[in-house]
Amino acid sequence: MKIISDIFKMQRTADDLRASGKKIALVPTMGYLHEGHLSLVDEAKKNADVVVLSIYVNPSQFAPHEDLSTYPRDFARDSKLAEARGVDIIFAPEDKVMYPEKELVFVETEEVSHILEGEFRPTHFKGVASVVAKLFNIVKPHVAVFGQKDAQQAFIIRRMVSDLNFDVSMIVAPIVREEDGLALSSRNVYLSEENRKEATVLYRSLNLAQQIVRDGERQFTRVRSEMLRHITAESQGKIDYISFVNPDTFTRVEEAGALKRVLALLAARFGRTRLIDNMFLEVSHK
């Protein structure tokens, strides 16, 4: 496994791989790898000859009050996990390489970037879309693999690829969960033992929503109320939002209409740790 930190070396390597007929897959991460990240590597290996995993804690997607300085990092551990899983190249640049001078150009998305996560993290998706565009130009992948846990991010990147005509195919892999249902996240390490137990209520509330919708409920205000009741009854979690969107457009929906499935998303805080989760709900049309 190679480790590359220089942009031009990564670009030359990508050019050489492409010239030799190799198909490149990119798995973008901020490191502190867990099984969720590694499942993306597995998916990448199915769809390419060479897997490049990027490890970069991108400062432009963090607001001043967020956890940039304390975000968990362990490059030695990450390298061992990546190599054992079959990663061919780790691209791990430093800030001075990715942002050598004050940035003047960003990728900014309309509408979808201002709802849900965008309401609580107004500059977040501008930073995400911009750094992913940079990674696409540096790694030059044929395919890029993202996780469904960050559903809004995945939707925005997919639209960026489409709207800006990036020559990249995009794969969104399923959420990986602990045995008790908690979605894997690098930030789970922040949770106290008590918070960790309480946080499983998010997955249970999503399953509750699925059951209610399968039973024929078509008004999502009622589904939201039941989820809220469940979460507040079983935890001290502070909910930022519970929302339902059309997965094809990411527009909010309050009733099922003709939709066959709806994406339920939520965000909540347990202690000082903010977690997100989501689930596709299959709508009953009995």
Image (spheres, rainbow, N blue to C red):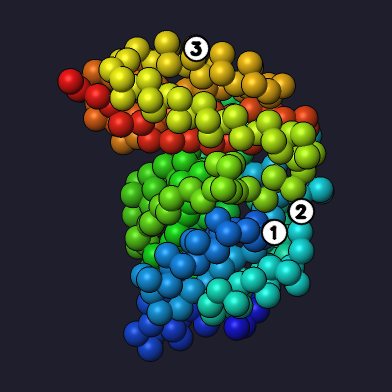
Lower sequence index among marks 1 and 2:
1
Q: Residues within 10 Å of mark 2 (few under 14, many from 20)?
A: some
Q: Kindly identify which numbered label has been placed on residue 225.
A: 3
Q: Position of residue 184 (x, y in %)?
A: 60, 48
Q: Are marks 3 and 2 in contact (CB under 8 Å)?
A: no
Q: Is residue 136 left or right of residue 143?
A: right
Q: Kindly identify which numbered label has been placed on residue 283.
A: none
Mark yes or no: residue 212 visible. yes
Q: How many marks?
A: 3
Q: Which residue is mark 2?
A: 72
Lower sequence index among marks 3 and 1:
1
The quadrant where residue 218 appears: top left
Q: Are marks 1 and 2 in contact (CB under 8 Å)?
A: yes
Q: Is residue 186 above or below residue 79?
A: above
Residue found at x 50% / y 61%: 39
Q: Which residue is mark 1?
A: 32
Residue found at x 73% / y 60%: 95
Residue found at x 79% / y 39%: 192
Residue found at x 35% / y 60%: 169
Residue in front for this viewpoint, 181 or 84? 181
- Helix, strand or loop at label 2? It is loop
Q: Are marks 3 and 1 in contact (CB under 8 Å)?
A: no
Mark yes or no: residue 5 visible. no
Q: Position of residue 58 (x, y in %)?
A: 67, 53
Quarter of the rendering occupied by the C terminus: top left
- For the residues labelled 3 and 1, the Cα–Cα distance comes to 35 Å
Residue furthest to the bottom = 20
